[in-house]
Image (tube, rainbow, N blue to C red):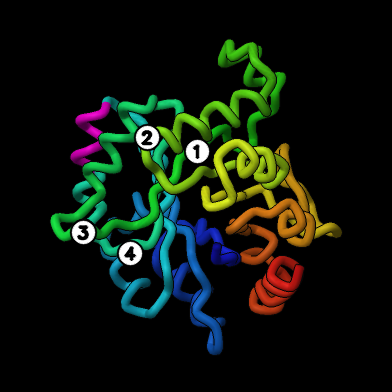
Amino acid sequence: MAKDVIIACDFPGAKETFRFLDLFTQEKPFLKIGMELFYAEGPSIVKEIKRRGHRIFLDLKLHDIPNTVKKAMSVLARLDVDMTNVHAAGTIEMMRAALEGLTRPDGTRPLLIAVTQLTSTSEERMQRELLIQAPINDTIVQYARNTKEAGLDGVVCSPLEAGMVKEACGTDFVTVTPGVRFADGAKGDQVRVTTPARAAEIGTDYIVVGRPITEAADPVGAYRRCVKEFMMQ
């Protein structure tokens, strides 16, 4: 299974995004395009970043009735992204519909993964606000099993849960993990976090890193540090 660092390009628009990407004269990092940037710029930002040679994780977290998600995925399939996602809470039926919509007529498709629980969600919040009374780890593993049953490639989970997801769903089941911070950095609004080196030890496949790179005084240096800590384990 390939390992890589994905930079979360959570910028308000194209100008800020390309100012950031222009700093990288040697590397072509794997990039995550989330709701803020996609809603601001639309499909054109995806096409231009692909033209520049970057791989893209389109992070829109679709969650709707199965037919709506299927139709939306059939549109996203035309953008030639490398990975996209849905919410596992949408049920197995919805995830299967997403997979069907994302698969092109020639049988090719991007990786499709599902969000288990957001890394900003604590067990206390999940139980009190969402009325999910099971422990958060049990919930995440069950959502991962549902995702595998639906035929998807893997899940988004915190790095702290990647090991248990692999144990439940197999080593080939992809784990994509936000909530990664340098040991000497701030946690921000994330709750379940760890370092790049620890994420590698746990066995996750991809880590998603945003502010520790994009808001660093030296973003390229921060990216290289992250790659070194994660990839060298």
**Quadrant in which the C terminus appears:** bottom right
In the picture, the disc for residue 78 is 3
Q: Which mark is residue 150?
A: 2
Marks 2 and 4, Cα distance to the nearest angstrom?
27 Å
Q: Residue at 59% across / 14% down in the picture? A: 132
Q: Is residue 69 magenta?
A: yes
Three-letter amino acid code at disc 4?
Val
Residue 64 is drawn in which quadrant? top left
User: Mark 4 to mark 1: distance in Å?
Assistant: 21 Å
Amino acid carrying label 1: it is: Val
Hey, which residue is sitting farthest left in the picture?
A: 105
Q: Main secondary structure of the magenta part?
A: helix
The label on residue 115 is 1
Residue stretch in magenta: 66-72
**Mark 3 Cα within 10 Å, few/some/many (few <14, many 20+)?**
few
Q: Is residue 11 visible?
A: yes
Q: Report which residue position mark 4 lands on.
A: 46
Helix, strand or loop at mark 4:
helix
Name the front one of labels 1 and 2: 2
Residue lying furthest right in this view? 184
Q: Position of residue 159 (x, y in %)?
A: 68, 47
Single out the mark in the foreground, 2 or 3.
Answer: 2
Distance (Cα) linking label 2 and label 3: 22 Å
Is residue 144 part of the magenta span, yes or no? no
Disc 2 residue type (three-letter): Ala
> What residue do we see at 41% from left, 64% from top?
56
At numbered mark 2, what does the secondary structure look like: helix, strand or loop?
loop
Asked which secondary structure carries label 1, the reply is strand
Please say whether residue 222 is visible from this viewpoint. Answer: no
In percent of width and height, residue 71 lies at 19, 40
